[in-house]
């Protein structure tokens, strides 16, 4: 219902990453898969998450019927750092979080794109198809006369590889900074206010300040916090707490979008 | 989420009637029970519905944990007309519908209320507690002198017993009129337009016209139709189709409320 409300069409969704089997993180899946089936979907859906996701969904399908499309389950490897998903554009790496049940965060990173060749240089150096393939991969060009033309001279500056890390739910874990180092966007749960730090620890959740500390230690560009406890009437308080530590913090709700612009190295 | 959106507090819900195990009729239960648990609920919840509801929920709880309050399951009797629920104010009677899976409608009827005694008559006839108990139950009063005072003279006209029938989902079934005869409010599903009558029959759903025919045959006060297929951009078309047959038809959406005023016999 939230997807529909915010104008996202289920047909465009092919991969779904589930952090853990708590209701607020997975109950929407039942309706989403059901809606996809009702809409006559035929293309496969890939589900990523804890190993219990598959038997749980299979039990569910015993009562509600399986979806009329293929459903593929993918489980993170035991060893850290192994990509759970990879295509020609991005990789997705799971990171084990510390919560009350088996929980994963996911880090989405763009792959390096092929370089764009400066058009005027193609004519200037008489570059052929075979030359261009090499240059686009970052090689220098060697002319028929044996002269080396640096790759940098022939190509536009490379695009920055954008990245987004989704960290929910977890107790404060400073070690996460290593995993999310330098990402453009970090979503980190911030269930509690600093004054409820004990409660955060007891329930294996984080405070806004702790989320900000991870963002600061990791040197991310921007921190998104959410998953606020309903006990706080004004989540702005939590955002302000986080900004004391990490100024570029934004509080987020369902339906918010944050774009990371595609920029070339050396530009802002 | 819809309950919260429309300002209904889950703590006030003690009995939940499920028509059948299709996603659009039951998936919300997972989140509702989970929310009730998170809010610290301790009082029991009673669930009414097809017999598969219990094992389905128990499987679900294997993965998400059982609720921290008692959950009681109640299944309609095989014989028709037997109350599924009864307290001092109302009865709830299931009615078997004809759909693609075991499906029940539910008819909610107020019980007869104790009569209100006219205050001036208490003094006039010197009515004691024992007399009043009898009169409130509808008995005439017999004075110490053996004179019969009619119950009607001593009491205000009785309240009408209000009733509501919830019929979703079902193929057109004229026999339903007998079950819902004379109810004040009838909700009847109207998934399809008259022009898609064949599709209604094939999917075991009803058209707006068919819902109106049941309402007309049953002589209900007001018909509520809903459960419209998303194929109709303007459900007003379906409401107009129904009104041709049964003028007092209203199209309903999530969150709408319809009150049946409490009136005394002989008044409007």
Image: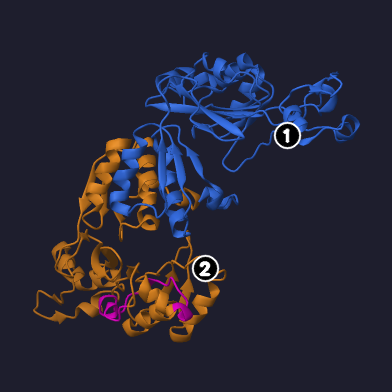
Chain colours: A blue, B orange
Q: Which residue is mark 2?
A: B231
Q: Chain of mark 1?
A: A
Q: Which image quadrant: the C terminus of chain B?
A: bottom left
* x 49%, y 81%: residue: B241
Query: Residue A188: which quarter of the image?
Result: top right
Residue A101 x/y as whole percent: 37, 27
Number of the front mark, 2 or 1: 1
User: Residue B154: in sight, yes or no?
Assistant: yes
Residue B63 x/y as whole percent: 31, 36
* Label 1 Cα neighbours within 10 Å, binned few <14 / some 14-19 / many ≥20: few
Q: Nearer the viewer, residue B198 or A256?
A: B198
Q: Which residue is mark 1?
A: A261
On screen, residue A248 versus residue B108, left or right, reads right
* x 52%, y 22%: residue: A207
Secondary structure category for the residue under label 1: loop
**What mark, if any, has residue A93 been given in the picture?**
none
Q: Nearer the viewer, residue B68 or A127?
A: A127
Q: Nearer the viewer, residue A23 or B183?
A: A23
**From mark 2 to mark 1, how far is it between C-alphas?**
37 Å
Q: Nearer the viewer, residue A29 or B151?
A: A29
Q: Residue furthest front?
A: A145
* Residue B180 is inside the magenta segment: yes
Residue B119 x/y as whole percent: 29, 69
Magenta extent:
B173-196
Quick check: A145 above or below A29?
Answer: above
* x 41%, y 45%: residue: A71
User: Residue B185: in sight, yes or no?
Assistant: no
On screen, residue A267 versus residue A165, left or right, reads right
């Amino acid at each position: 219902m939230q997807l529909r409300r915010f104008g996202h069409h289920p047909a465009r969704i092919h991969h779904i990453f589930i952090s853990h089997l708590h209701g607020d993180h997975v109950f929407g899946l039942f309706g989403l898969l059901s809606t996809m089936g009702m809409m006559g979907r035929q293309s496969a859906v890939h589900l990523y998450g804890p190993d219990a996701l598959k038997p749980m969904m299979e039990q569910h399908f015993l009562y509600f019927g399986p979806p009329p499309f293929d459903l593929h389950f993918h489980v993170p490897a035991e060893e850290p750092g192994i990509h759970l998903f990879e295509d020609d554009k991005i990789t997705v790496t799971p990171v084990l979080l510390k919560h009350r049940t088996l929980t994963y965060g996911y880090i989405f990173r763009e792959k390096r794109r092929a370089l764009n060749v400066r058009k005027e240089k193609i004519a200037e150096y008489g570059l052929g198809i075979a030359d261009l393939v090499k240059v686009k991969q970052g090689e220098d060009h060697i002319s028929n006369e044996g002269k080396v033309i640096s790759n940098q001279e022939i190509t536009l500056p490379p695009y920055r590889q954008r990245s987004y890390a989704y960290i929910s739910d977890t107790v404060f874990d400073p070690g996460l900074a290593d995993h999310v180092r330098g990402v453009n966007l970090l979503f980190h749960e911030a269930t509690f206010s600093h004054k409820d730090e004990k409660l955060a620890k007891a329930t294996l959740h984080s405070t806004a300040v702790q989320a900000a500390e991870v963002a600061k230690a990791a040197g991310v560009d921007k921190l998104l916090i959410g998953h606020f406890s309903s006990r706080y009437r004004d989540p702005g308080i939590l955002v302000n707490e986080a900004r004391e530590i990490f100024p570029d913090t934004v509080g987020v709700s369902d339906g918010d979008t944050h774009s990371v612009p595609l920029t070339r190295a050396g530009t802002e």
